[in-house]
Image (cartoon, helix red, strand yellow):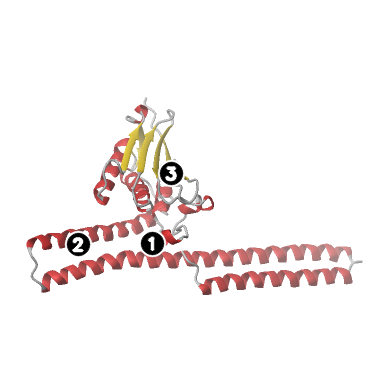
Amino acid sequence: MRVKPHRRKSVAFFITLGACLVAVAVALNVGWIILNWTEVAMLVLGIVFFNLLIFGLIVNTTFLIREIRRNEQHDAFINAVTHELKTPVASIRLYLETLKTREVDERQREEFYDIMLADTDRLLKTVEQVLRAGRTRHRGRRIANSVINLSEIVRECLELARVRYGLNETHLTYTESPEASNARVSGDIDELRAAFANLLDNAVKYSSDEVRVVVSVSAPDEKRVTVRVADQGIGIPQSQLKRIFKRFYRVPGRFMARVKGTGLGLFIVKSVVQKHGGRVYAESAGVGQGSTFIVQLPRVIKK
């Protein structure tokens, strides 16, 4: 995400204003102390007032900068969602107009239908992402708990990704440890399916020219089930590994800008995993070194 020039100017203005106010406050306080150095009580009150003034200026400047960055993320989100909604709608309209105004043979008609169905799926997926992100923000929202075989859910998402992107088993590889085949977790099957689908979509989209994604499920102990989604794609800078799970956030970079998205996928993943009592984090050696996302969920202990 590129920072707009007027945003940079706003940030620079508030930083400069804060620095000037701090300098004025220091000068006034030092001058006041010199003129009233014999008044100990007033001196103490002046120091306290000075510290409160500096603290207030720092807090004010921090919140202003944070609000500007939040607005930038909101603008980027609106632009991304607008593009993700407008593009498939325009495509569907174009093919419908073609079918209405021109005679096309059966083969071409079937091709048009397939394209429109794919655009409809893309449109539906964007809407579902936005709605799911809104639901996951409500921490008090209850999830439909049921005992789930996690490896089955992961394999199901993997097969769906293979069909969606036209990939085979060499592109998307699945492995599991013997202990994980019967590992159960407690949770909402639809929420967990959405989380792992998002991880797989990201792994494919941010891969290099040739997709190589390895998904593994393991049960390292009786308390946890671990799912790893590793790709050999563009990687993630070390400084961005924790920020990528924030709502609307997208890693800046030339290649990242070419991959369309809403910045909600990893936010949904983290929200779902946390609601299920687990944790998710990312690992990467850096740009061009691929990345691995690890999800750990509490295992249902057999009685």
Q: CA distance from mark 2 to mark 3?
A: 34 Å
Residue 222 placed where, x, y %? 42, 28
Give yes or no for contact between labels 1 and 3 (Cβ–Cβ under 8 Å).
no
Viewer-closest of 263 and 148: 263
Q: Earlier in the sequence, mark 1 or mark 3?
A: 1
Q: Say what amino acid the circle numbered 1 marks.
A: Arg
Q: Secondary structure at mark 3?
A: strand
Residue 114 placed where, x, y %? 17, 58
Left or right: where 221 falls relative to 198: right
Residue located beneath label 3 in the image: 292
Viewer-nearest of discs 1 and 2: 1
Viewer-closest of 292 and 303: 292
Q: Say what amino acid the circle numbered 3 marks.
A: Thr
Residue located beneath label 2 in the image: 116
Q: CA distance from mark 1 to mark 3?
A: 21 Å
Left or right: where 95 falls relative to 271: left
- 274 lies above or below 205: above
Residue located beneath label 1 in the image: 258
